[in-house]
Amino acid sequence: MHENAIRISIFLIVFFIVAVWELIAPRRALIANKTRRWFTNISMTTINRGLMVITFPVLPVGLAVILKEHGWGLFNILDIPYSLKVILSFIILDFSVYIQHVLMHYLPLFWRLHRMHHTDLDLDVTTGNRFHPIEIALSMCLKLSVVALTGAPALSVILFEIILNGATQFNHGNIFIPEKVDSYLRLVLVTPDMHRVHHSIIPKETNSNFGFALPWWDRLLGTYRALPEGGHTAMAIGLKEYRDPDKLMLWHLLMNPFR
């Protein structure tokens, strides 16, 4: 319960900071109705949170504690410093999310689930929570599997969950960051300008910059793209097949993978 309270608190703090930042210094002019978008995206967040509570009897942090008690998993067997276990576990978890994201784009069945995230006509802090419930469930299964195999320390899992949630809201934010600052920041963290390219309507840009928290995997594996062709203020966001705002409401999005 304590860990859950910390996660929710930090989630709300980051959400509030980015939302206010978007009002004070927006990166782009929004084109869609913000009230409708926010209702849809926040409703999706609520549904997904409820799904996790109902569907999964144990979540990654709880699993990490169980594994430690029984001595199961790679890092519970290896005799290496605890700090190294925490760092390596975090890196492995982040890499697994990168791989999952790539597969969500290139495997047709997975893309049916993930494309809902890309149908948003604007990009802001709420887009970071716009994921189909089935995709969230699959993502949770992946994280549980990685934690089970690695025996990741609970501290590492907590840090990963908190940083991933915060980074996802941050890098979807419609916020202005000076170019010079962004160039240094994206060496250690996926920035909004870096991730925005991933939401371009141009397929070769959509299939780039897959990282959520750590930016290194895109550079190492050749999926990094520094800038969108049309520039950040003029680029079109979303998918060319889904441009009607009336077809992007909550019910339509929930049914999207089955159409």
Image: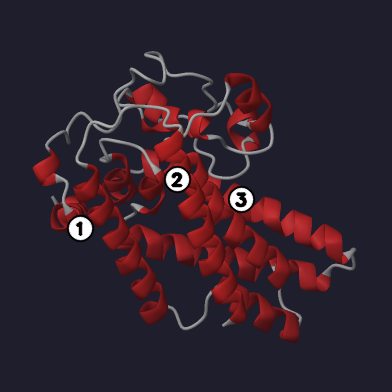
Label 2 Cα crowd, 10 Å radius (few <14 / some 14-19 / many 20+) = few
Whether the residues at callouts 1 and 3 have beta carbons within 8 Å, the answer is no
Q: Position of residue 124 (x, y in %)?
A: 38, 41
Res. 246 in view: yes
Label located before the other in sequence (1 or 3): 3
Res. 153 in view: no
Label located before the other in sequence (1 or 2): 2
- Compared to residue 49, the image places residue 227 above or below, namely above
Left or right, 204 with respect to 60, comes to left
Residue beneath the point at 63% across and 59% down: 160
The residue where tag 3 is placed is: 94
Q: Amino acid at mark 3?
A: Asp
| Quarter of the rendering containing residue 222 | top right
| Quarter of the rendering containing residue 235 | top left
Q: Nearer the viewer, residue 243 or 32?
A: 32
Residue beneath the point at 48% across and 40% down: 21
Label located before the other in sequence (3 or 2): 2
Q: Position of residue 137 (x, y in %)?
A: 39, 65
- Give the CA distance from mark 1 to mark 3: 27 Å
Q: Position of residue 103 (x, y in %)?
A: 43, 44
The secondary structure type at the circle numbered 2 is: helix
Label 1 Cα crowd, 10 Å radius (few <14 / some 14-19 / many 20+) = some
Label 3 Cα crowd, 10 Å radius (few <14 / some 14-19 / many 20+) = many
Q: Amino acid at mark 2?
A: Val
Q: Which mark is residue 47?
A: none
Q: Which mark is residue 20?
A: 2
- Give the CA distance from mark 3 to mark 2: 28 Å
Residue beneath the point at 41% across and 78% down: 53
- Give the CA distance from mark 1 to mark 2: 29 Å
- Compared to residue 156, the image places residue 187 above or below, namely above
The secondary structure type at the circle numbered 1 is: helix
The residue where tag 1 is placed is: 254
